[in-house]
């Protein structure tokens, strides 16, 4: 499958992207950044960005028109924060982490309250709505997936996963959960009390990230072994499933250095997607054309998290140490910052010649 996103299809000049306009967010976290989330409400003229970090805080910044960020609010945890998400209307932020708790911050009042608990650290939290009711789903290292209605202190339902939860994503009624031992669970949020489908990842190595397509017909999977898989939910679409190599260094003799795919983000309008890795690069891809749209130079450190804003005009990426090379790979001078990349017209547009599925 290696040739599906073959770089020979286009000349290097127009597939290499430019980082010159990227702006660094001021007053970043003091430790590695774990997750990024923009407010998704299209009616809100402003862009707010939530940034979760090992420094036990989730910071919320307003992104100003000149690209600068202004700190607006903060959620404080009793341990490193692993995951954050905005409510659909953009008025509240939820975050969760090693303190086994999820907290919601009301941006209007500045008040935060605990809304969820696990027996082990919570790796992932996502907001969703059930028949218009605001809810959250959390996944923890206690191998549990819990649903929370914020009006109750107890979970609305609990699902037992096969292994520790490493990654999850929600789009419409589609919830996808990736665990240790390469299990992928697909859940229909209209029937959240059971797994709609369980599968092993088509990738041979540990799952780092799952990310749902905009149309919720499927999802992308990234692994530690420089590979990405495109997977459709329904068996009737299985002929469209494929995987491809990415985030690998050019071969040196018989050796190829491969890097983890740490995050995958879908462009909100075009449905194209980004991959970002511990090699310190990101790429934009068109899954329907099986084509790489743009690759970018090394940003100077591992990219731990990425996200697009609601219009797709800003691509945010976090540069932090991701522990992919163990404690020896860390150093006091390792960069720790959030960068904002202004998305140019052609960077994420799908190739025009391709028939859509």
Image: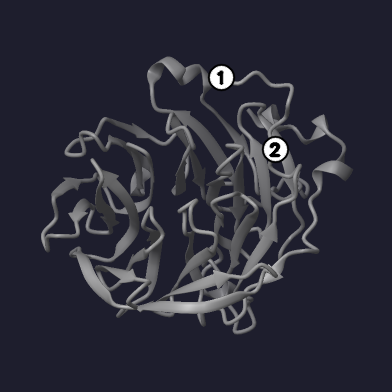
| Residue drawn at (14%, 60%) of the image | 151
Left or right: 223 in relation to 140: right
Left or right: 19 in relation to 51: right
- Residue 20 in picture, x, y percent from top left: 80, 64
- Residue 250 in picture, x, y percent from top left: 76, 47
Q: Is residue 179 visible?
A: yes
- Residue 278 in picture, x, y percent from top left: 60, 59
Instruction: For marks 1 and 2, give the CA distance.
Output: 16 Å
Left or right: 312 in relation to 175: right
Q: Which residue is mark 2?
A: 349
What crowding class fits label 2: few (fewer than 14 Cα within 10 Å), some (14-19), or many (20 or more)?
some
Q: Is residue 108 above or below residue 123?
A: below
How is the model colour-coded? one colour
Viewport quadrant of the C terminus: top right
Which element is circle 2 on? loop
Q: Earlier in the sequence, mark 1 or mark 2?
A: 2
Q: Which quadrant holds residue 342?
A: bottom right
Viewer-side residue, 153 vs 275: 153
Viewport quadrant of the N terminus: top right
- Residue 164 in picture, x, y percent from top left: 29, 53
Q: Which quadrant holds residue 191?
A: top left
Q: Which residue is mark 1?
A: 357
């Amino acid at each position: 499958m290696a040739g599906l996103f073959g770089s020979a299809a286009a000349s290097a000049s127009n597939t290499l992207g430019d980082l010159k306009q990227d702006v660094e967010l001021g007053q970043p976290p003091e430790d590695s950044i774990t997750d990024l989330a923009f407010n998704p409400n299209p009616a809100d003229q402003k862009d707010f960005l939530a940034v979760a970090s090992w420094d036990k805080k989730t910071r919320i910044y307003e992104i100003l028109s000149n690209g600068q960020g202004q700190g607006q609010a903060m959620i404080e945890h009793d341990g490193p924060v692993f995951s954050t998400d905005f409510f659909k209307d953009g008025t509240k932020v939820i975050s969760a982490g090693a303190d086994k708790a999820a907290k919601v911050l009301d941006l209007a009042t500045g008040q935060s309250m605990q809304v969820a608990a696990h027996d082990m650290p919570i790796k992932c939290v996502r907001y969703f709505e059930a028949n218009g009711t605001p809810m959250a789903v959390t996944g923890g290292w206690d191998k549990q997936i819990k649903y929370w209605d914020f009006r109750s202190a107890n979970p609305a339902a609990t699902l037992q996963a096969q292994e520790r939860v490493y990654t999850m994503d929600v789009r419409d009624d589609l919830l996808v959960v990736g665990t240790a031992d390469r299990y992928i669970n697909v859940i229909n949020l209209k029937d959240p009390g059971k797994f709609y489908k369980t599968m092993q990842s088509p990738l041979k190595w540990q799952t780092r990230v799952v990310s749902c397509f905009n149309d919720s017909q499927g999802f992308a999977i990234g692994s530690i072994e420089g590979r990405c898989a495109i997977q459709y939910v329904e068996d009737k679409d299985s002929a469209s499933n494929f995987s491809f190599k990415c985030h690998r260094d050019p071969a040196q003799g018989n050796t190829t250095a491969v890097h983890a795919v740490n995050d995958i983000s879908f462009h909100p309008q075009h449905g194209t997607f980004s991959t970002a890795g511990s090699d310190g690069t990101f790429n934009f891809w068109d899954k329907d054309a099986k084509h790489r749209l743009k690759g970018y130079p090394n940003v100077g450190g591992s990219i731990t998290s990425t996200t697009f804003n609601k219009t797709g005009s800003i691509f945010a990426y976090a540069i932090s140490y991701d522990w992919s090379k163990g404690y020896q790979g860390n150093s006091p001078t390792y960069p720790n910052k959030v960068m904002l990349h202004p998305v140019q017209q052609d960077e994420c547009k799908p190739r025009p010649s391709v028939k859509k599925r």
